[in-house]
Image: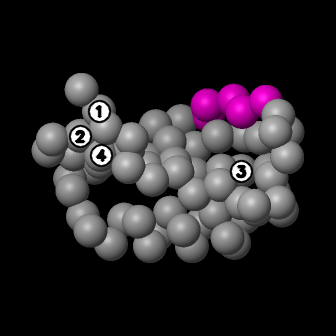
Amino acid sequence: MDKKINENVSDNLKPGKMELIATQRFAINPEMYRIIDFLNRSLKGHNILFGLTKSENSMIISVYEVE
């Protein structure tokens, strides 16, 4: 079962609809959190949000479109 570790949500993001666009599984990499943070900070004005989930032996990046 996946354990939700980190989902970087901007403080300025108003509650609304989030639509899952894509997910991709990767090997565990401790630097992945920095990548997700960078993407969320860089693209926060484009209605895109990235999430990161960690399971026992992998990490999953989720891409959302937000309203």
Residue pointed to by mark 1: 2
Circle 3 crowding by C-alpha within 10 Å: few under 14, some 14–19, many from 20: some
Image depth: mark 2 or mark 3 in front? 2
The answer to if 64 sits in the magenta stretch is no
Residue pointed to by mark 2: 55
Amino acid type at image mark 3 = Ile
Residue pointed to by mark 4: 54
Residue pointed to by mark 3: 48
Q: Do labels 4 and 1 touch, CB within 8 Å?
A: yes
**Quick one: quadrant of the C terminus?**
top right
Label 3, label 4: how far apart the Cα atoms are? 20 Å
Label 4, label 1: how far apart the Cα atoms are? 6 Å
In the image, is 27 to the left or to the right of 51?
left
Query: Helix or strand or loop: what does disc 4 sit on?
Result: strand
Question: Which segment is the magenta one?
Answer: 17-21
Amino acid type at image mark 1 = Asp
